[in-house]
Image (spheres, rainbow, N blue to C red):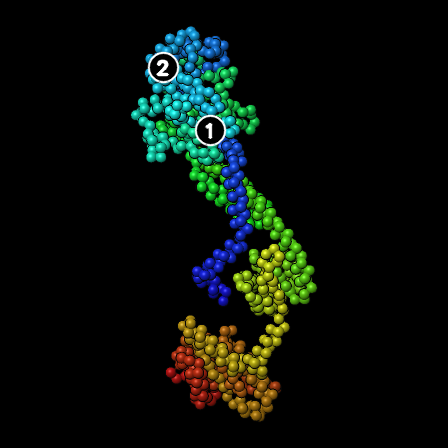
Amino acid sequence: MFRIFKGLAPSPIKKLASLKHKLTRRKHVFVTSLGVGSAVILLRVLGLLQISELAIFDLFIRLRPLEAPEDRIVIIGIDEKDLATYGFPISDKILAELLQKINADRPRAIGLDLYRDLPVETGHEALNQAFETIPNLIGIELIEMPAAPGVAPPQILADRDKIGFNNFAVDIDSRVRRNLLFAGNSEGEVRRSFALQLATIELEARGLTRELTDNQEVKWGNIVFPKFRPNDGPYIRADDAGYQVLANFRNPRGGFKTVAMRDVMEGKVSPTVFRDRIVLIGQTAFSIKDLHFTPYSSSLFQQPKRQYGVELHANFLSQILTAVLDGRTLIYVWPEAVEWLWILGWSGVGACLCWKLRSPYRSTTMILLIGVGIVGGGYLALLGGWWVPVFPPLLALGGSAVVVMAHLAHLQEELKRSTDFLNSVINTIPDPIYVKNKNHQKIVVNKAYARLVGLPADKIQLRTDYELFSRSEADVFWGQDEQSFHTTWELENEEKLTDFYGKEHWIATKRSLHKDAAGNQFLVAVIRDITERKKSEAALRSRADLDPLTHLPNRKLFEERLTQSLQWADAQNKWVALLFLDLNHFKSINDTLGHLVGDALLQLVAGRLQDCLRASDTVCRLGGDEFTVILPGIPSQADAARVADKILDSIGQDAEVEGHLLRVSTSIGIGLYPVHGRDRETLIQKADGAMYRAKRQYPGGGYEFAEP
């Protein structure tokens, strides 16, 4: 019945019950995954994971493949040798001469990353003239901040709106990872960044103008620069003043072409180096201390390296240009709610995996492999421009795994105590007993069960039913045990069990479910060996169904066999032949020679009938000297006739019985199903009638077919 119901579609009520059962069994998994995931999210919201997440982001940035150098930007660095040659600060005269030399080579724009709020004699007039006449010259200002005073721009450039601020957004670990495009000053004015001003010149020269989307985000063409929010990525309550985007730094090893100021002043730089390019002028002398940490500043084996301010501006400028002109990806982040689901999901994976595997070694291995997958996935995502959380899901994955493994260790200890107790109890019981868990593992077997199976208890516990018994027997045991796991009442079944040595046993097994103190569910099976009872029942059935003299099936069993044969013939569209036999002159032999000779003759005839028939045929003795033969699957009437001839020849041979040489013949009536009858009684009557006709027509033995 269990196998029948198993194939039926469950009703909605059964589905709900099954779901409730599964949820109950896995409540520890759900509670653990939700609890650990929520704890990780809380740590993240409190900002305790921010440094770790930023460090992983920096690592991924440094591991990216080296990009082609940025050909649109050239840096003129003022290094220590230049300071020694031209002094510090650079005089207005020298700076004016430098600007005129660069402008003569027709660059796209010149960015002067040097503060020039005060004159530096001599040559101030020459510098002012350069500020007035060079068309695409952009200077800098430092917007006043709460913690630092501002620096005013050159007034001439400010009047021409050729100024950009050079303020940076610095993270809590003193690194620059954000590109500040717009900011407000103390007068409430919106100011543009140094990099943005230079990028605008380049892009407008290519016919691209800056726009604002409906969400008030900056857009060039189809490229939207997503505005930074306080909780984007790993950031927690970060300062998002102005308009910021996440910076996408270039690797310093393949960054920007840099030339020394002295080489420009001495005419050692080809005019083609600056032509149609954006030229940035800035300090690259260590003594000036214009150095900043970036994602490329960290290294596992070297001291942190900082980048000069002019290099940061080059990176910010390059990010804008390459995103709009080359399709180089920006850095995007998920919404905060999606990141929370991401963390909770991996917490669930860790809990479910460890609950499923239930092995510290396998669980640890799988967690490590998944952890590598998360790290690798985060790196690949960053290559595609997405900053995906890595450290929080790793923490959630490992944390939920540790909690579940600790819980499983506790359950294992409880199980061991339960197993020890069960062993001490069931070994005192003489009946064979085994205890299975829901995975069909035998966790306890007593000595009586070990004797029944023929193997030591420890070896039995290491093997499944399919390794202990034949497949047919194991299917029965597994099915009965599985049915018990899905019921709440006690079940009892009779089954056949073949032990390790090939001896067959009939057993009656009573199965019931039990729980220990830790809530573990077990199947307890108590077995009784009923082999002797089955033998006695078989002997009784044999005496009831067999003729005591010839040991052939009697009339009762004949009727059962004939009914089965006719049912089989209907299902297979086959014929069945029924032969009625009566020995000729048997009464005279019995009367003259005695019952002892008559009985021996009947036994002889029974043996000859069995010898000349197939194993699938049935020979029966109805009583006296009457026999029947059932021939299932007979192909034709001619085949039935050949069998009858064979019987006549076999029985008609001389035989020595109790010292007497006897010859006996038989008369046979043949009925064919379904030709001569469509039911058992009709077929019997037709075959019996045919036998009496054969007796009258062939006194020396013969056969007749039933009349249609």
The quarter of the image holding the C terminus is bottom left
Decide which of 496, 248 is in the foreground and name it: 248
Foreground: disc 1 or disc 2:
2
Q: Is residue 481 above or below residue 355?
A: below
Residue 454 appears in view: no
Residue found 59% across the figure and 47% down from its top? 405
The residue furthest front is: 187
Residue 291 appears in view: yes
Q: Is residue 617 above or below residue 136?
A: below
The residue furthest top is: 122
Residue 44 placement, left or right of 503: left
Q: Secondary structure at mark 2?
A: helix
Q: Please tell me the numbered disc located at residue 156.
A: 2
The quarter holding residue 505 reads bottom right
The residue furthest left is: 207
At label 2, the amino acid type is: Ile
Decide which of 597, 436 is in the foreground and name it: 436
Sequence-first disc among 1 and 2: 2
Residue found 61% across the figure and 55% down from its top? 518
Residue identifier under label 1: 177
Residue found 44% across the figure and 62% down from its top? 11
The quarter holding residue 195 reads top left
In x, y percent, where is residue 132?
A: 34, 13
Decide which of 265, 467 is in the foreground and name it: 265
